[in-house]
Image (cartoon, rainbow, N blue to C red):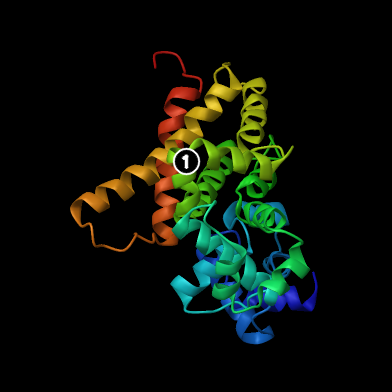
Amino acid sequence: MSHDRVQDREDAQGDDPEDPGALLDLAAQLVAREGPDLTMDRLAQAAGISRATLYRRIPGRRALARQLRDERGVELAVRGSTRARILEAAGLEINERGLLAATIERIAERAGVNPVTIYRLYQDRDTLLREVLESRSPRRSAARLLDDCDAPMVETLTAFTRAILAFLHENAGFLRVALFGAGEEVAYIGKLRRAQTGTLVTVARYLEGQMARGRLVADDPRATAFTLIGSVFTDVFLRARLQSFEDPSATPHNPSAAELDARAAAIVHRFLRGAAPRGPGE
């Protein structure tokens, strides 16, 4: 083990390096010592765990940055400079105005750049919005989190569910399009996604692998994936609707990392009550 890793682990004061709270403490220490350009690779190395294990605890650098900001008051550097500002501005426009209303001119104004800069980096509107969807989609997280069917199933499903919950809270506009988008908007998303393997397919493949191992009741993997993902969408949507009924002027609720952990664990628990094999007498 390298000297840096030993020092990092000593700074963690003996905490479990795989515990999300201990990982945030370690990340905050690394930022203080090495600067705000902390990467997921560096955090995994410092904690002495694999990238796969880290991504099961914290699904990506965006999630790490949010948790550090909300729970430790520590800011990570925005990566990518002009390109990052454009992507962030485009995501905000989609959330607030919808996919079809997100114009290059509005995005440029919000990002503080000239529209010519966007065209130079992305060629056209479709290319930009395709990259926004790609960068914010949970598809990559799903592929990382669900690539090992032999890893602990409950832990893996909980990490995946938490990543989807966080994505939907951070990208309310995508949830609106998914649930209530008009035909033209939904068709446009299909055009942008092209032949990408969707999250539903990835989840279905993972669940099929668990069924083959006897950990889940044999059933239609795609229908079972619908049940799990639908539970997550329902949780986020109904909470938002209840909040709007109780206080229409309230700002959208931004759940803490601890709340996301608890909600993900509860969703997976309910899901497995119906999908996991039952023992004698159950």
Q: Residue furthest right?
A: 2
Q: Residue 154: x and y, percent?
A: 54, 38
* Tag 1 residue: 181
Taking 151 as reference, is 253 left or right?
left
Q: Is residue 249 above or below residue 35?
A: above
Which residue is situated farthest in the top direction here? Answer: 281
Q: Residue at x 51, y 44 (%)?
A: 161
> Which type of secondary structure does the marked residue at label 1 adopt?
loop
Q: Is residue 244 above or below residue 151?
A: below
Q: Is residue 157 left or right of residue 49?
A: left
Residue in front for this viewpoint, 209 or 178: 178
Q: Is residue 23 visible?
A: no
Give percent across and percent down for residue 85.
Answer: 62, 73
Quadrant for residue 156, please give it.
top right
Above or below: residue 140 compared with residue 41: above
Task: Give the quadrant of residue 54.
Answer: bottom right
Query: What amino acid is labelled 1 in the image?
Result: Gly
The quadrant of the rendering that contains the N terminus is bottom right
Q: Residue at horizontal 66%, vertical 77%?
A: 114
Instruction: Determine if residue 251 is in view.
Output: yes
Query: Which x, y percent locates residue 109?
Result: 56, 75
